[in-house]
Image (cartoon, helix red, strand yellow):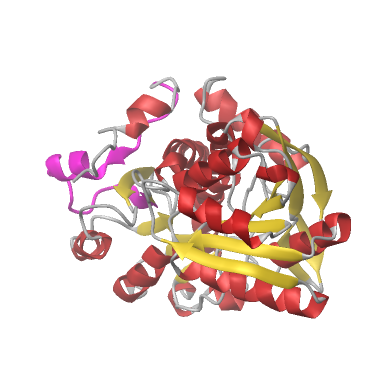
Amino acid sequence: MECEGCHPDPGRRALGHKKEDAALPIELADFRASGLLAASGSFRVALLIPMCGSAGIWAPSCISSAQVAAAELNRKDGIGGRRVQLIMIDAAVEADEPIEETVNDLIELNAIDAIVGMHLSAVRQRLSKVVRQRIPYIYTPLYEGGETTPGLFAIGETPAVQLAPAMAALQAKYRPRSWAMVGNDYVWPRSSHSLAKSFLKSAGVDLAMECYVPFGLPSLSGLVDRVEASGAEAVLVSLVGQDAVNFNRQFGRRGLHRKAVRLSCALEENGLMACGRGNLERMFSVSSYFGSITTDANAGFKERYFGLHGDAAPALNAIGQSTYEGLHYLAALLRDYPAVWHLRSSRDILPVIHPSGRSYARDAGLKRPDVYLARADGVQFSDFKLL
């Protein structure tokens, strides 16, 4: 079932690749209609991504990046000697069909072998109670941390390694006397802001305001009014997808960048372009991946990505790259830990060796992704600072 406003087939419309180069992912509705839900020779991965609502802006990049990983795996032995097939499922919080029921039914029918999920934490929390170690579940984006469910592996960065260093860097450079914090009303913004408030308290900096809003508000002018009235000299923007775009457009049009610097942990290249060049002055983003960053890992990933999809492919960004990495993490997890993956979790920090567009470093003996603070420069990011 589609959400209102969703295109019926983002996989066909948005990817821009040649059909002969790689098989298209199949949408859930087509998968059901095929009559082939029973187990087959393929290794079926449920690719859970938001296809509508505030986070729907991420879908084309997520699908395209996952497809590169599937093509790479299928040029070798697939997963466990079986060809990888991607099943696209709408995991937006605004989706009409309950994701828990969908996923549970597919697992019960042996129709899927694993999950790679790039969706909001609110959805992950619901699904973690349903999957119950029956199939591996790789959760790919940045998130609030603390996930310990067995059989569920969260591979994105957390506020401790992402947000805190970025706030410290901006505080040192601009010395704002107060911060405002705005976000959608769910676990990731609230948890991130809790850490941010601890940082401000330790730095002796004031919190001017804090506000959370539902997804998809028709207007964010009231929220921008509150930020402006607060007099904050820095704003932590923890809004998702289109909500972040709408906020930043209004913020820029009012010229509020002259009064306050902005920081986001989730603004990526698609959102940047949607905000518009003139609305991004003194806008910063922090992430372990940017499409324009010049690292060996990203150079290789970009070559494979555009080699498959062509120059008109959706923008490379952290959200999309995470699905590429998630599929490779899944394959390596099942290769190296086939008998125990269901007993392990993110907390175990398994040494899973897998391809990635991100660069990794060693910190106290543990492998962690490099994290960068970047400045919005027109409709791309630049001035990368390793944190």
Residue under the point 36% across and 66% down? 135
Residue under the point 27% across and 60% down? 99
Rendering coords of residue 265 (x, y %): 63, 55
Look at the picture and state if 78 lies above or below 61.
Answer: below
Rendering coords of residue 355 (x, y %): 63, 48
Residue 337 showing in the rendered view = no
Q: Is 379 in front, or is 15?
A: 379
The magenta stretch spans residue 25: yes
Q: Is 28 in front, or is 77?
A: 28
Rendering coords of residue 163 (x, y %): 69, 63
**Badge count:** 0
The magenta stretch spans residue 62: no
Q: Is residue 385 left or right of residue 318?
A: right
Residue under the point 54% across and 47% down? 319
Residue under the point 52% across and 57% down? 140
Rendering coords of residue 2 (x, y %): 22, 43
Q: In the picture, residue 117 is in which quadrant?
A: bottom left
> Which residue extends farthest front?
229
Q: Is residue 170 left or right of residue 266?
A: right
Residue range corresponding to the magenta coloring: 20-48
Q: In the picture, residue 20 is in which quadrant?
A: top left
Q: Is 337 in front, or is 305?
A: 305
Q: Quadrant of the C terminus?
A: bottom right
Q: Is residue 283 left or right of residue 311?
A: right
